[in-house]
Image (tube, helix red, strand yellow):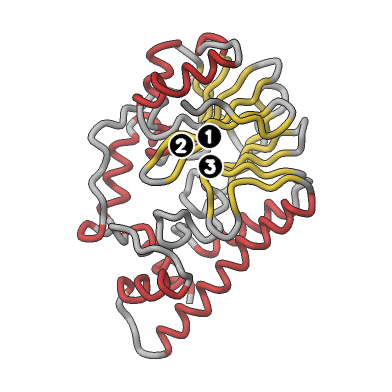
Amino acid sequence: MNGFRKVLEDIYILETPSGGVWSGIILVDGEEKILIDSGDCAGNIDSMLIPALQELGYGLKDIAWLCNTHCHGDHVGGHHRIVELSGVKVAVYEESVPKIKDPLKYSKLIRAAYPEYSAPAPAVLDGVKPDLVLKEGDVIGGRLQLVAAPGHDTDCVSIYDRKTKTLITGDSLQGNGTATQGTALYMDLNVYRNTLRKLMQLDVENIISGHPYLFSGDMAVGKKASAEYLNKCMEITDIYDAYIRAQVEAGKTEAAEIAEGLIQHMGNQRPAFLFLPLYTVNAHLRAM
């Protein structure tokens, strides 16, 4: 069984399985214990999270707040089970409020944009009612500051730990995507680039991502490494843009064909379903 891995002085990550990669559940073990994200399903809460907390001498009842970086199913799939078992309070960014109440509805909506290229929505993805609605700049637990970071999706946030100057990013920083995505996923290129520029202006000494990303990795330790991580994410958008522009100039107009070529161009593995690369390719096409 995997337990929490200590990544900084009082910040831990639990790597829960999610579609061929892992999705991280973050524990900030401060004066108030805070969980950020909950993996992709209720089963992982019982089989992984609870035992991992017990190894540290804690239970779900010790958690003061449950937060999330955005409302995709692989980040909020365990929320309902955690609340069901413990009654922990849920803090949610204002843009996530309608989605966290019914994440399955939103999961189906994401897939509806490209139905012939999409994986089925999860069979079960229960929502929760927020106890606290957060706005840009709000602080929870005396140290965790919400930073709106859209691009991957409209409700994405990064959470900045003012104590350790650590940026907990979830999917806000996409690198070259994960091994199962095919490409990075962002729904709006210009918004994503603006988020990267915004995060580059913060005093960041460490980065913790929600998955192991190709090209950039799952974390960066130190100011220099964190700056390089952010720069790599921006560099990927430029590489994608150059390839897609060249394809358009060569007369290719079908997004699916361009997505297939981009995956191969980047040396990535073609996913079973193309809907995530299609979002990214079309984001570039709209920005041209």
Q: Label 2 is placed on what type of residue? A: Ser
Disc 3: CA contacts within 10 A as few (<14), some (14-19) or many (>=20): many
- At mark 2, the secondary structure is helix
Asked if marks 1 and 2 touch (Cβ < 8 Å), the reply is yes
2 or 3: mark nearer the eye: 3
Residue found at the very far front of the displayed protein: 1
Which badge, 2 or 3, is on the more N-terminal residue?
A: 2
C-alpha separation, residue under disc 3 versus residue under disc 1: 17 Å
Pinpoint residue 57: horizontal percent, then vertical percent.
Answer: 60, 10
- Residue behind mark 2: 96
Any part of residue 95 in sight: no
User: Relative to 140, does residue 195 appear above or below in the rendering?
Assistant: below
- Residue behind mark 3: 210
Residue beneath the point at 60% across and 56% down:
216
Quadrant of the image occupied by residue 236: bottom right
- At mark 1, the secondary structure is strand
Residue found at the very far bottom of the displayed protein: 250
Any part of residue 32 in sight: yes
- Residue behind mark 1: 93
